[in-house]
Image (cartoon, grey):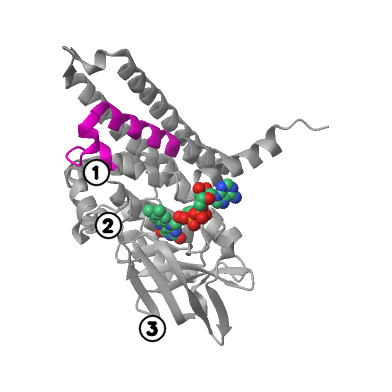
Amino acid sequence: MDDRPAATAVERAAAFAAELAPRAAEFDRTEHLPREVIEQMADAGFLGATVPIEWGGLGLSPLAYGDLTEVIGKACASTRALLTVHTSLVAETLADRASRRIKEKYLRDLASGRRIACFALSEADAGSDAASMSTRYLRKGDAFVLDGHKKWISFAGIADVFLVFATDNGVISAFLVDRDTPGVEIRPMSGMLGNRATHMAEVVFSAVEVPAENLVSGIGAGFAFVVNPALFRGRYSIAWAGVAIAQAALEEMCTHAARREQFGSRIGSFQLVQKMIADAVTQVSAARELCRRAGRLRVERSPEAVAATNVAKYFSSTVAARVTSDAVQVLGGNGCWNGFPAERLFREAKILEIIEGTSQVQQTLIADFGLTTFARKG
Ligand SMILES: Cc1cc2nc3c(=O)[nH]c(=O)nc-3n(C[C@H](O)[C@H](O)[C@H](O)COP(=O)(O)OP(=O)(O)OC[C@H]3O[C@@H](n4cnc5c(N)ncnc54)[C@H](O)[C@@H]3O)c2cc1C
């Protein structure tokens, strides 16, 4: 794979991130990601970062995409979330799993950012156990009719197209639903701990007719062939998001510890503060290497890539939560105040332990992998 386009994409992302970072607090406070930021992402090609070039994307490798995600995620978690949802969960999954007809209809527009996508899986009563969803579909002639209620859907407030999962007596299928289809109702949500500028909404489907051609990967393929591959990609993105937030918190912590004086000395000279810094440096480096390992295994199409991604996501989100907590500690009162980024990073990090499979779900998956891989036979 030619890495030159990747290098320039990551360089362009760094320039974009430098302008983005000073605005992240405002997006968080106003719970609003401005349209012009999304357009900048689209114009730079970031929204199609991993979509193959033949479908209008940048065709970045997972490793380059990881770098790009870290750079943007360090500047603004809500902006990075658009990459996770639109690019990783939806566009990349359609590039891999959808029919040529669906790709012709949607993928170029998603890669260019002309249309924004969201991923509608969770419901009020179906989170970790997403397969227990109650949103239903029924075949009706040349269409499917959807009824149900999705919750916590990032970017549903502005998305043009929804990748929706529904069940017919336990047979789960995936559908692409256009926002303007009659019967689609968007109910914006606010008051979230983090990811506040992600235009989150509930989405209600009342007798929504979806053309049969918008079925993704066939009847009953919704979980094994669409949800699981999508979450594999989403978790990879979240793993890098953890590195991004932890790195940002590490820089806040070190900058403050190097300047702040108490008891006549820089607080960075106190060994108890140094322990937090040493742990943060070590953990961020380890998290980044686990993400790179997952990326390399994805490039090699190794069957171990799934387990490596779960490990990276679990570790990296845990590290982000720990390092941001220590950053708040090192900043003291300033760490508890929104005049400094540490408190926002602390809130954003916690989200990563919940989304794309909670830490407990990751632990369960990793333990299953351990038991099947490392238990001696006989
Ligand atoms: C900021 C944010 C953005 C989101 N964006 C989207 C989106 O775009 N699209 C979408 O579809 N969803 C989205 N979600 C929903 C998210 O995927 C769910 O919140 C997540 O899957 C957890 O489900 P839950 O909230 O129902 O928690 P639950 O599943 O009810 O879990 C509650 C607790 O029980 C634990 N638990 C559950 N099952 C087990 C088990 N078997 N073993 C051990 N512990 C267990 C969990 O780890 C957790 O600690 C978003 C959520 C947030 C917070």
Q: Amino acid at mark 1?
A: Arg
Q: Which mark is residue 42?
A: 2
Marks 2 and 1, Cα distance to the nearest angstrom?
A: 12 Å
Name the residue beneath numbered marker 1. 12
Marks 1 and 3, Cα distance to the nearest angstrom?
A: 40 Å
Mark 3 or mark 2: whose residue is earlier in sequence: 2
Q: Secondary structure at mark 1?
A: helix
Residue 266 x, y percent position in the rendering: 20, 15
User: Over which residues does the magenta segment extend?
Assistant: 316-344
Mark 2 or mark 1: whose residue is earlier in sequence: 1
Number of marks present in the image shown: 3
Left or right of residue 364, residue 62 in this image: left
Question: Which picture quadrant has residue 105?
Answer: bottom left
Q: Nearer the viewer, residue 344 or 99?
A: 344
- Whether residue 68 is visible, yes or no, is no
Name the residue beneath numbered marker 3. 182
- Whether residue 351 is visible, yes or no, is yes
Residue 74 x, y percent position in the rendering: 29, 40
Residue 321 counted in the magenta span: yes
Residue furthest toward the bottom?
A: 141
- The residue at the point 49 percent across, 39 percent down is 314
Q: Nearer the viewer, residue 154 or 103?
A: 154
